[in-house]
Amino acid sequence: MSTLHAAPPVMEAVDAKMKAFVEAKEIAGVVTLVADDEKILHLSAVGFSEIDKKTPMPTDAVFWIASMTKPVTATAVMMMQEEGKLSMDDSVAKYLPEFRYLKDAAGNEVVITLKQCLTHSSGLSDLTPEETKNLTSLKELTPVVAAKPVQFPPGSKWQYCQTGINTAARIVEVVSGKSFPEFVQDRLFDPLGMKDTSFYPNAELVARLATSYKRTDAGELEKADLFFLNGKSPSEKGRYPMANGGLFSTATDYSIFARMILRGGEWDGKRYLKEETVKQMTSVQSGDLVTGFTPGNAWGLGWCVVREPQGVSAALSPGSFGHGGLFGTQAWIDPVKKRIYLLFIQRANFTNQGGSDGSDIRRDFQNAAAK
């Protein structure tokens, strides 16, 4: 059931759309994957992983998946909730003493909950690259986050927030007794067979890393650094594990995680989460707050939820959920049609509304795949 086909089929309509974006120099190359809850329906690579060397994009190319890390982090948090080690309504300060003195700009004391961290409604301030570049652990990150003023009354608005997700991951460390990379390795990646997913990919994975590009004003593609590495190898462990966006993965690896979620928390005879837990995590938890990144969305716990499909999300059913990443990667799960859509590219500087979530590439891929 969970074994991968030697050569999954290819949807010609998807490849045609992707080739057009490569030819237009919108992207260097792309891996696309479509699956249902049982098998891969389409897996294909188009274009180049490295333009100068004319290296063809392989289907097992490794990508920085950026904020597609957030649903993995949320899944780890929900595992701890199932074990009775935390609750969404708990205050963060219950687990992290640094937050007992959290204040707003006026000096008033503020209490935030785990749920507000995972729905981007905590009001926590994000950190600058300068503030984070020498931090080596989530434990070191926590007091820096807690020292900054809260920007609005928690729960009163939606504002995309990296520090809230990292704070939730730090709580997982505290209640599990494991570092966050150890936790996701032991509880998700190893048992699921996700051998290509890591915060610190080894040399073999780095050798398969797709080159990142940005588009110039002249319409050309030039190399773009993964800024958070500060010029170092992705393998180096001297940086904190960015639970908000630090994972590297492949389309096939992430499809296993996505199919486990689509199946209500079960994969290959092993249960990772209860069905009701998956439902809680992937259904609207943000109430009536107006959320990003594209119109018609709401927020679950670490997942974006499509409330009213439109524009880029028109091919999805109401109640579909997923997440994008800064350099264009996209993962969307349609629980009605039982479909998973994965788009893996490495392109910085999407300037359209909604950033990479609002890209024509995402729209055309999903539309072609849905047909």
Image: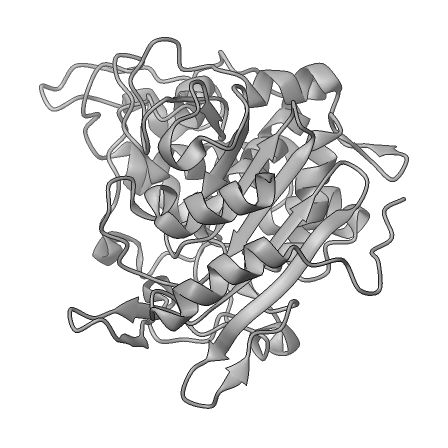
Position of 282 relative to 29 (above/below):
above
Q: Position of residue 346 (x, y in %)?
A: 42, 64
Give the farthest residue toward the left. 106
Residue 106 seen in this snapshot = yes
Residue 174 seen in this snapshot = no
Position of 75 relative to 365 (above/below):
above
Q: Nearer the viewer, residue 322 or 39?
A: 39
How many discs appear? 0
Say whether residue 357 is left or right of residue 75: left
Residue 293, quarter of picture: top left
Say whether residue 265 is left or right of residue 145: right
> In percent of the image, x 55 and y 69: which residue is there?
46
> In percent of the image, x 75 and y 49: which residue is there?
40
> Split into 4 quadrants, where in the image is the N terminus?
top right
> In percent of the image, x 39 and y 27: which residue is there?
310
Q: Nearer the viewer, residue 312 or 123?
A: 312
Q: Position of residue 153 (x, y in %)?
A: 22, 14
Residue 98, quarter of picture: top left
Q: Nearer the viewer, residue 314 or 359?
A: 314
Say whether residue 48 is left or right of residue 274: left
Q: Position of residue 134 (x, y in %)?
A: 33, 61
Tell me which colouring the rendered structure shows: one colour
Residue 216, quarter of picture: bottom left
Q: Position of residue 300 (x, y in %)?
A: 49, 22
> Split into 4 quadrants, where in the image is the C terminus?
top right
